[in-house]
């Protein structure tokens, strides 16, 4: 494992006291010291319950972060809910075309950088509340290809803490980068711990005896 170089937090935000109060009412705290840059990607872990979304949205409001996130395109077709989902930062995606989605997001980051505009994307690398054997690569591809910091965010139900204080620069060595991320998330407990995916790249699908191109 390579040494973890944690980034400073020069970009400061103004949060919402009401959202912080609601979280505190349920025993939750948010740790946030600012952002290392105007653009970047958050990897939020673990995702084992529908409650994760509620806690994450309240935490986003509590720190004053305008954060976009991917959601299944079918959710945006629901009357009323789709409009609300866009309002809180949701971006509809088709899961069967991840490469196209990554390219679009990288372009969006480039435009935000040119305009000196704040643009952060929050993703759940597990992609589902069910157990999976690893993490999907979308968050990694976007951060690496866009050349932006990665924020490692934990939803720790054991301590009732949302920790969004650690930001790193990916090296392109996926094995080393995932080892560093796993070290940062050691001991974090989801609402349903048995459903939390191991912090590693999703294993390649079987090729039935043929080499995968």
Image (cartoon, rainbow, N blue to C red):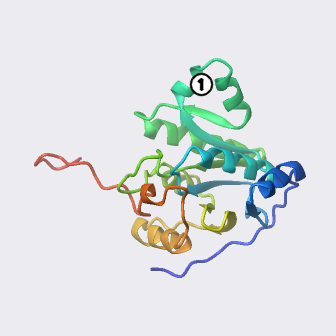
Pick the quarter of the image with the N terminus.
bottom left
Which residue is found at the position 74% from the left and 32% from the top?
Answer: 87
Q: Where is residue 155 in the image (x, y as percent from the top left)?
A: 61, 59
How many numbered markers are drawn? 1
Q: Where is residue 94 in the image (x, y as percent from the top left)?
A: 47, 31
| Residue 64 visible, this orientation | no
Looking at this view, is 125 or 190 the one in front?
Answer: 190
| Residue 108 visible, this orientation | yes
Which residue is found at the position 42% from the left and 65% from the top?
Answer: 174
Neighbour tally class for label 1: few under 14, some 14-19, many 20 plus, Cα within 10 Å: some
Residue bearing the label numbered 1 = 76
* 7 left or right of 45 in image: right
Q: Position of residue 196 (x, y in %)?
A: 46, 58
* 172 left or right of 8 in image: left
* 121 left or right of 178 in image: right
Whether 72 is drawn above or below 37: the answer is above
Looking at this view, is 132 or 25 the one in front?
Answer: 25
Which residue is found at the position 66% from the left and 55% from the top?
Answer: 40
Which residue is found at the position 21% from the left and 48% from the top?
Answer: 212
Residue lying furthest left in this view?
209
Looking at this view, is 50 or 135 the one in front?
Answer: 50
Residue lying furthest top in this view?
79
Looking at this view, is 131 or 114 the one in front?
Answer: 131
């Amino acid at each position: 494992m390579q040494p973890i170089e944690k980034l400073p937090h020069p970009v400061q935000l103004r949060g919402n006291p009401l959202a912080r109060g609601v979280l505190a009412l349920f025993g939750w705290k948010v740790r946030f010291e600012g952002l290392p840059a105007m653009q970047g990607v958050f990897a939020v872990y673990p995702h084992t319950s529908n409650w994760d979304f509620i806690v994450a949205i309240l935490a986003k409001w509590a720190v004053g972060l305008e954060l976009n996130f991917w959601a299944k395109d079918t959710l945006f077709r629901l009357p009323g809910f789709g409009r609300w989902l866009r309002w809180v930062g949701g971006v509809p995606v088709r899961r069967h075309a991840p490469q196209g989605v990554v390219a679009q997001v990288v372009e969006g980051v480039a435009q935000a950088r040119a305009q000196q505009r704040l643009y952060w994307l929050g993703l759940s690398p597990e992609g589902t509340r069910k157990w999976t054997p690893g993490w999907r690569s979308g968050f990694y591809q976007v951060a690496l290809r866009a050349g932006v910091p990665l924020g490692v965010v934990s939803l720790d139900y054991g301590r009732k803490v949302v920790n969004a204080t650690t930001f790193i620069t990916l090296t392109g060595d996926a094995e080393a980068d995932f080892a560093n991320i796993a070290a940062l998330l050691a001991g974090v407990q989801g609402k349903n711990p048995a459903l939390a995916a191991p912090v590693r790249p999703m294993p390649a699908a079987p090729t039935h005896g043929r080499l995968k191109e």
